[in-house]
Image: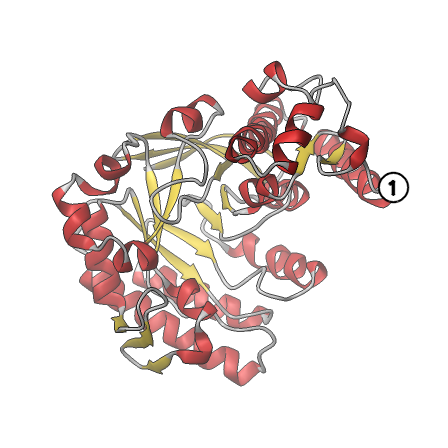
Amino acid sequence: MFKVVARSADARRGELTLNHGTVSTPVFMPCGTYGSVKALTPVQLRDVGTQILLGNTFHLMLRPGPEVISQLGGLHGFMDWNGPILTDSGGYQVFSLRDSVRLDDEGVTFKSPVNGDEVRLSPDISMHMQTTLNSDIVMVFDECTPYPAEHEQARASMLRSVNWASASKSAYQGEGALFGIIQGSVYDDLRSQSLEALHEIGFDGLAIGGLSVGENIEEMNAVLAALVPQMPPEQPRYLMGVGTPSDLIRGVLLGIDMFDCVMPTRNARNGHLFTWHGVVRIRNAIHKQDASPIDPACECYTCQHFSRAYLHHLDRCREMLACTLMSIHNLHFYHELMAALRERISENTLSAFASRLLAQFADANRVGPSV
């Protein structure tokens, strides 16, 4: 399923073979939470370089429900996407509703944010739903530990996630790859215990969950630096819900293979556009008469056809086209960044390239570009 084809220090370039295609890693996965990446069609996603999408079990279970998706060809047929799809199990969304969740050893009960109905979610229900979706990569049902958490609280949460991971594996009857999720908050000993337990259960890949939930960047990086070297080198490594271009670069340097985050599309809808020289804030008045593209060096559809002035105008008028054009640019940038990292790994020149980019992004943030 996964093979490493090149290395540069700890970074790996790999090929992840799934039911709906082969993915080149390291890879960024756009979030299609409700069965769509906001404002973009499947054709546009392909055009910007998307290899694999992320869907969400929790939201698709509530709307439109498993019966509708099953009747219409699984999630691939439902959304007309013929490439690979990874589906999150719903654990993180339960975490976001934690104030109204009743938690027990077998699962969780909560009020639907759609209509207020009482809903049950457990390892077997999550696995059944993801089987219905026909996901290429299925995530075990886990508990996302809140931050901050005392050691004992984090330990109890981690052990519950391990038990649910075992139950998820027993319940899963689909044909996709099944990934475990390492929990343990910011405690290295708990992360190591979680990893060891998941390795004993046996999964096709391992994800790192429970980060980017409130801890500072130093804490997150410390967890990753201690944990990633312990992860099985023959399996794909997935860092969930992270993040900025700099986060992706640091993760790749450590040996992470897969990333997802809402940042490129969410930031696009808020007028924050990523470039190799920093963030362009298109709502700033300086762009009102600017005839230049977002980035003159960018080859995306948006930069090849439209000016900053036009995007500024669309955004100020709240035209839906603004979200589409700016999302095209941001996702193109993210995919181009990952492609550049893959190329440097193959050339074994990643270290100098990554250091230059990290310094460049840090300088841009310090001076508050555009800008």
Residue 290 vertical position relative to residue 115 in the rendered view, above or below: above
- Specify the amino acid type for callout 1: Val
Residue 14 vertical position relative to residue 168 in the rendered view, above or below: above
Q: In which quarter of the image is residue 149?
A: bottom right
Q: Where is residue 103 in the image (x, y as percent from the top left)?
A: 35, 81
Circle 1 crowding by C-alpha within 10 Å: few under 14, some 14–19, many from 20 = few
Going 19% across and 63% down the picture, which residue do you hit?
A: 171
Residue 194 vertical position relative to residue 155 in the rendered view, above or below: above
Q: Nearer the viewer, residue 320 or 91?
A: 320
Going 68% across and 64% down the picture, which residue do you hit?
A: 219
In this rendering, position of residue 201 left or right of residue 294: left
Q: Position of residue 34 (x, y in %)?
A: 35, 48
Going 59% across and 72% down the picture, which residue do you hit?
A: 187
**Residue 208 visible in image:** yes
**Quadrant holding the N terminus:** top left
Q: Residue furthest front?
A: 317
Residue 211 vertical position relative to residue 160 in the rendered view, above or below: above
In this rendering, position of residue 106 left or right of residue 218: left
Q: Where is residue 337 in the image (x, y as percent from the top left)?
A: 61, 30
Identify residue for label 1: 367
Q: Is mark 1 on a helix, strand or loop?
A: helix
**Residue 294 visible in image:** no
Q: Residue furthest right?
A: 367
Q: Nearer the viewer, residue 76 or 240?
A: 76
Going 53% across and 45% down the picture, which residue do you hit?
A: 256
Q: Quadrant of residue 292?
A: top right
